[in-house]
Image (tube, rainbow, N blue to C red):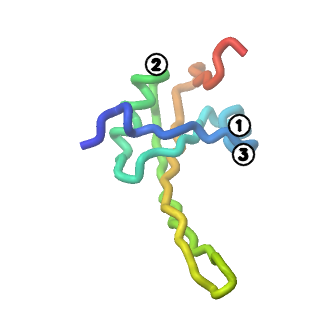
């Protein structure tokens, strides 16, 4: 079982995630591949002191990349994203004091 400090890897800081946060109060995180929805919910509630309503996850498979002139290939690692919806009126501040 994963510890709560190993569940969240980093927040998703993109234009799409900022629009989603403003419109629907939903925030994106890159999470550990082995983390389940309950672990993600508890980690976000603990670290950001908010009430989580909903968690959606998606696994992005690794991609095959070409390397070298002879057509050798490498595969990038898979990753997992989680979209976490918090209660109305609550907000997650990634950069405090800026």
Foreground pick, 4 / 40? 4
- Disc 3 from disc 2: Cα separation: 24 Å
Query: Residue 76 falls in which quadrant of the image?
Result: bottom right
- Disc 2 from disc 1: Cα separation: 19 Å
Mark 2 neighbour class, 10 Å CA radius: few under 14, some 14 to 19, many 20 or more: few
- Name the spot of residue 22 as percent of width and height, x first: 70, 32
Q: Residue at x 49, y 62 (%)?
A: 77
- Name the spot of residue 13 as percent of width and height, x first: 67, 39
Q: Residue furthest bottom?
A: 70
Mark 2 — residue? 49
Q: Which label sits on residue 16?
A: 3
In the rendered view, tell whether residue 80 sits above or below residue 15: below
Foreground pick, 58 / 32? 32
- Name the spot of residue 63 as percent of width and height, x first: 57, 70
Mark 1 neighbour class, 10 Å CA radius: few under 14, some 14 to 19, many 20 or more: some
Q: Residue at x 49, y 22 (%)?
A: 48
Please indicate whether residue 23 sits to the left or right of residue 53 in the image. Answer: right
Foreground pick, 15 / 89? 15
Q: Residue furthest top?
A: 97
Tell me the quarter of the image containing the C terminus.
top right
In the rendered view, tell whether residue 46 sits above or below residue 63: above
């Amino acid at each position: 079982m994963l510890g709560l400090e190993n569940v969240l890897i980093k927040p998703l800081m993109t234009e799409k995630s900022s629009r989603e946060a403003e419109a629907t109060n939903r925030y994106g995180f890159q999470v550990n591949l082995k983390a389940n929805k309950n672990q993600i919910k508890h980690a976000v509630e603990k670290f950001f002191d908010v009430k989580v309503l909903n968690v959606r996850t998606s696994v992005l498979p690794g991609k095959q990349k070409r390397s070298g002139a002879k057509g050798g290939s490498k595969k990038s690692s898979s990753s997992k994203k989680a979209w976490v919806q918090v209660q109305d009126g609550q907000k997650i501040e990634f950069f405090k004091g800026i």
